[in-house]
Image (cartoon, grey):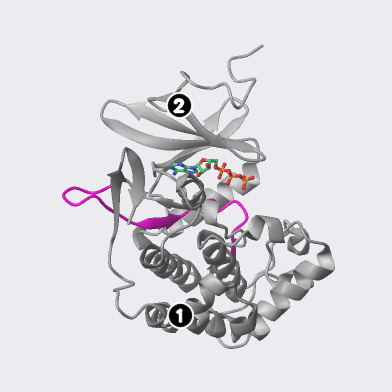
Amino acid sequence: MSSYDNLLNLTGSHIRGYQLSRLIGHGSYGAVYQAISGLDTIAMKVSMQEEDLLIEASALQLLYYSNISPRFHFTGKYGPYHIIGMELLTYDLELIRETTPWKSYKRPTLIRIAYQMMKCLQALHELRLVHRDVKLSNFALTQPKTPGNQVSVKILDFGLSHVYADADGNLRDDPRDFNFSKMKYSSYDVSLGCDPAPKDDVIQASYAILYASGFDFREKLKAPEEILMNWKRELIRIPRDTLPLMMKFMTPFFEMVGELNDIIPVNHDLLKQRIQECLPEMDAGSALIWTEEDGQPLLI
Ligand SMILES: Nc1ncnc2c1ncn2[C@@H]1O[C@H](COP(=O)(O)OP(=O)(O)OP(=O)(O)O)[C@@H](O)[C@H]1O
């Protein structure tokens, strides 16, 4: 058995001058490790899927200066695996939601998270990139900055992303030919069979925001196809009546999400403005702070 037989067993391996020190997590085809070289600690994604990993690497390079995705360091090979070295983030937003006592974010935190999610999508879409796999666990926090422990939200996992248009605006097909209509958390249009467009990233983000608020989206996804489709349609058609009680305060945002279509480009600035209108007494664009309360990590 060679030293790289098992993707999940690479702790201790030396790759590109880094030693893999801890398995952070794994997805369907790859694993992410923490890797250390002297004082430098990074994240290393190791995967069997060459094509998706190369697409992820090029997306991260394209986004390098936008500051909304992990900073790209390098890409390469290790035995049968393809690797990406990138900035190490801390916890993803789903993990934090799960560890809070009420399994939800409080309004002022939620509003700032939503605002930063829109900033992430704005930067992507301005580079004609669609993410196509937007969910709460694909957003993660940066390492806290001193002084003040400020953190920001970055977007992860570009394996399913796609540059949807060239510089002249001509639409580009993805030869990988994924079937996004089968993805449970696809937007209504995509569930019907339409190609995912920027507005569908925003709609998926609106589901992630609902989930972050404490709404049991995971349970909703288990509902029979017809009921789920009906809910997705009603959420964009009449958000005021479809939103759960605790989320009615975000109606201005959801109403605007409901008006999005594939003809008029997404106006991210207006979406951010709508998020701000949902909780006027607080600055939605202000920084998130990572702290501790009774020994428990807390995001405020
Ligand atoms: N740069 C990073 N810094 C810190 N953690 C990361 C980084 N990139 C990914 N992770 C974490 O590593 C884990 C695995 O990520 P990965 O993107 O491979 O799979 P996934 O999103 O969990 O699953 P899937 O591939 O099925 O969507 C996740 O928990 C993710 O939060």
Query: Observer-nearest residue: 15 or 88?
Result: 88
Q: Residue furthest top?
A: 1
Q: Is residue 261 visible?
A: no
Q: Position of residue 225 (x, y in %)?
A: 82, 64
Q: Earlier in the sequence, mark 2 or mark 1?
A: 2
Disc marking residue 224: none
| Amino acid type indicated by mark 1 | Leu
Judge whether residue 70 is colored magenta.
no
Disc marking residue 271: 1
Mark 2, Cα crowd under 10 Å, few <14 / some 14-19 / many 20+, is some
Do callouts 2 and 1 mark residues in contact (Cβ within 8 Å)?
no
Q: Position of residue 295 (x, y in %)?
A: 32, 37
Q: Identify the magenta region.
A: 144-163
- Quadrant position of the N terminus in the picture: top right
Question: Which residue is pictured at 44% across the width and 51% down the height?
Answer: 140
Count of numbered labels shown in the rendering: 2
Question: Which residue is pictured at 77% across the width and 75% down the height?
Answer: 230
Q: Position of residue 240 (x, y in %)?
A: 59, 84
| Amino acid type indicated by mark 2 | Arg
> Label 2 to label 1, Cα distance in Å?
38 Å
Q: Is the CB atom of the residue marked by disc 2 within 8 angstroms of ligand 1's nearest atom?
A: no
**Tag 2 secondary structure:** strand
Instruction: Tell me the quarter of the picture where residue 221 sits.
Output: bottom right
**Tag 1 secondary structure:** helix
Instruction: Tell me the quarter of the picture where residue 179 sits.
Output: bottom right
Query: Observer-nearest residue: 144 or 47?
Result: 144
- Magenta segment main secondary structure: loop
Q: Position of residue 17 (x, y in %)?
A: 37, 25
Q: Is residue 80 above or below residue 28?
A: above
Residue that badge 2 annotates: 22
Question: Which residue is pictured at 76% across the width and 67% down the height?
Answer: 228
- Quadrant position of the C terminus in the picture: bottom left
